[in-house]
Image (cartoon, grey):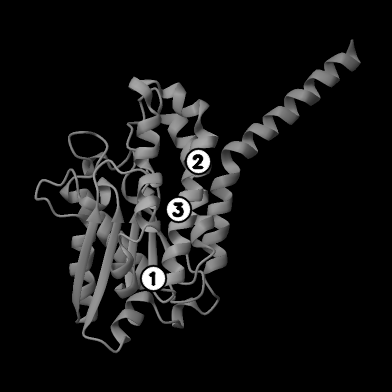
Amino acid sequence: MKLLFKYLMSILIVAAIAVSLWLYYPTYQIQQMKEEAAPASAQAALSYVDYFGKLDKDTLTHLAIGDSIIAGFGSENNVSFVSYFSYLLGEQTDKTVILENKGILGINSSDLNARVQTGEFDEQIKNADLITINVGGNDILQTLDDGDYQNVVRNFQSMQATFTKNLTDISNKINTMNPDATIVFLEMYNPLKQDHELYSVADQLLPKWNVKIYEIAHQFNHAIVLETTKVINAHHLQYLSDDGVHPNALGYEALSDQMMEQLQKKPFAKSTI
């Protein structure tokens, strides 16, 4: 009986460790990639904003592709965060920043990848100094079949695999066409209130989703992941629009401020996250 009890306890312990690793290891991986990306001499290094300011041109081009977050849906004044950011970048560098906002409402990663691969944005990619990409939210929403949240959980791995392939393909195409462009990816955020029945599930799955974005960014020169989750979370619900999903004008402005802060702090170096 004692041996059986020890055996059962061993199984439970191993299971608990496995679950903990499954839930929390992605968060650890993300933090490790952030730390590895910053060289020891980061404070003395040229920042991204410094780099853009020193480019021998009077005009910078900012291409933004992706979904409704890029388009600025939810903003009361119809101003997107990439618009806010482009204005800030122009002020900081004393240059004219031309924004080409190609945000498309409802687009998922497969649709965006198809548009990129067929050359829809080729000219803009070739000419861009900065390319901001946000996609993936509609991959999840379209799996949310008539409010069946369990469908998202059941299909999470296959959905994430499709998203990861699409974002990798998009990034590879951009890097091949314009290896000097800085690429900014956005984390996926959790817009739910803490008392929502699915808040904890979403909070556990999001790091598993976001770690794939960091892994993709880590493969390229001059790629950054915007820490969206620092801005929009259960403690800052004032940044959400009435639909409870998209940022409002304040939220988009806060995202642009976060993007500027990261580009001011991060050294312009290979594979900077």
Amino acid bearing label 2: Gln
Where's residue 157, x and y in %? 54, 36
Q: Left of 224 or right of it: where is 60? A: left
Residue highlighted by disc 2:
160
- Of the pair 171 and 266, the residue shown nearer to us: 171
Q: Nearer the viewer, residue 119 or 57?
A: 119
Query: Looking at the image, can residue 150 be seen?
Result: yes
Estimate the spatial distance between the alpha carbons at disc 3 and disc 1, rounded to whole Å: 15 Å
Residue 188 visible in the picture = no
Residue type indicated by callout 1: Thr
Q: What is the count of numbered marks? A: 3
Q: Position of residue 189 (x, y in %)?
A: 37, 43
What residue sits 29% from the left and 70% below the top? Answer: 123
Residue 179 falls in image quadrant: bottom left
Question: SS at mark 1?
Answer: strand
Give the mark nearer the N terminus: 3 vs 1: 3
Q: Residue most toward the top?
A: 1
Question: Which residue position holds label 3?
Answer: 167
Crowding near the residue tagged with mark 3, few <14, some 14–19, many ≥20 C-alpha atoms within 10 Å = many
Which residue is depicted at the point 25% across and 77% down? 60
Q: Which residue is mark 1?
A: 182
Q: From the viewer's perspective, is residue 235 above or below residue 254?
A: above
The residue shown at (36%, 46%) is 111
Separation (CA) of disc 2 from disc 1 = 24 Å
